[in-house]
Image (cartoon, rainbow, N blue to C red):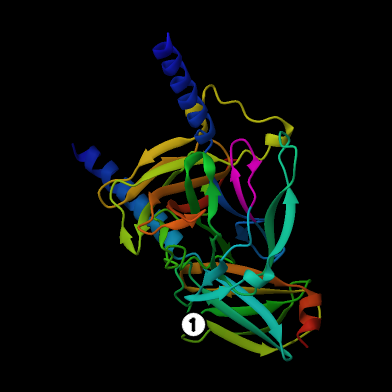
Amino acid sequence: MLNNLAHLLLSWSLVLVFASCGLAHFGVVLPSDDIVNQGESRSIELQLKFIHPHEGHYMEMMKPRHFGVLSGGTRVDLVTTLKSQAGRSGGQVQDFTFWKSDYQIRRPGDYTFYLEPAPYWEPAEDKFIVHYTKVCVNAFGLESSWDQPVGLETEIIPLTRPYGLWRGNLFSGQVLLKGKTLPYAELEVEYLNERAEQGRLHAPSDSFVTQVVKADAQGVFHYAMPKSGWWGFAALSEADWKLQYDGIDKAVEIGAVFWVYATDLQ
Amino acid sequence: MRTFKIIGLAFLFCLLLANSTLAHRVNLFAYAEGGRIFTESYFPDGRPVTEGRVELRDATEKLLVSGTTDDQGLYDCKIPKVSDLTIHIIASMGHRNSFLLNKAEIEAGQ
């Protein structure tokens, strides 16, 4: 009897652990436009969040350690432009902090915005999470540097130009860890369910929420986006360094995240 | 068999043509500063459009001034008129594009 009870408790514990781990975390850098053409606003609003994209759930986000833009081979620090905001999804009962920045585009070119957040403590997984997140905005048709690495600890280098994508396009990228390719990296792919607050998109089962693909021996992955909107790609690995929580060394999950926008063919 | 070869060659030619059109798409970016209008003409990969003809036209399409891009794809001139201006770049092989510089931007750059 005691044995059965122990088995039952163990099973329930596992269910609870998997339930809390089931939602994929994603760092997000969301620009108000991904292609700036003449006659359009050159002011880009960027939202920096830490969320579950499919559910739209926010998580508390401390002020990022680094936030900047790489353009024309030059990196510009934008941390001082960040302003804290409060937000929540429809199913949440409290507000969570996210960050906003406004950036004025003045010249043609590719603008890769990058984020290194402060480590997020995830008690359910007993580890810290740091998602190095990027998104690329093009201005005035000069498409010469969207594949340039920023030099983050881990990052995705797009092999497909990361803007001007149709729904159904194959997005390919290469995962780097400390500047070297990461063979057989595992990636989580998730759709930013922006309508979550008005009623989330239906997924027949949890397996549909987070798509999983593996990179090849050169760290190259591919994914065809089946719906228009923002898609996030997150290559996860464990850092070779630790952070302390309550005086105890804890593992750190580092993610290389890239966001691209797919448009309906009209 | 010969028909297949001709179809194959035609298909290959179409592919090459499509690719060359994409590679030769030209762009022009312009701004006003210090009483002058500066233009930059470039291909998507960043190569400059050299020896391209630049034309500045007003809202009635009247040609106000024209010139030629240098080896960096640049051309500049005095502001010819404070009004909405359409600036055209006409490169070799008939590749062309235009950029609208509105009156407010020109006033700010006087």
The percent position of residue A81, horizontal first and vertical second, equals: 68, 70
The residue that appears at 66% across and 89% down in the rendered structure is B77
Q: Callout 1 environment at 10 Å: few (<14), some (14 to 19), or many (20+)?
A: some
Look at the numbered disc 1 and give the secondary structure of its residue: loop
- Give the quarter of the figure containing the C terminus of chain A: top right
Q: Circle 1 is placed at which residue position?
A: B51
Query: Which range is magenta?
Result: A48-60
Q: Is residue A197 left or right of residue A53?
A: right
The residue that appears at 60% across and 58% down in the rendered structure is A35
Q: Is residue A236 above or below residue A212?
A: below
Q: Is residue A175 left or right of residue B49?
A: left
Which image quarter: residue A193? top right
The percent position of residue B101, horizontal first and vertical second, equals: 72, 74
Q: Chain of mark 1?
A: B
Q: Is residue A139 above or below residue B16?
A: below
Residue A55 painted magenta: yes
Q: Is residue A135 left or right of residue A2?
A: right
Please identify the residue farthest to the front as the structure is shown.
A2
Please, what is the three-letter code of the amino acid marked with disc 1? Answer: Glu
Which image quarter: residue B68? bottom right
Q: Is residue A75 left or right of residue A175?
A: right
- Give the quarter of the figure containing the N terminus of chain A: top left
Camera-side residue of B3 and A206 = A206
Q: Is residue A82 above or below residue A215?
A: below
The percent position of residue A3, horizontal first and vertical second, equals: 39, 13
Q: Is residue A253 above or below residue A151?
A: above
The residue that appears at 62% across and 73% down in the rendered structure is B88
The percent position of residue A77, horizontal first and vertical second, equals: 58, 74
Please identify the residue farthest to the top as the structure is shown.
A1
Which image quarter: residue B16? bottom left
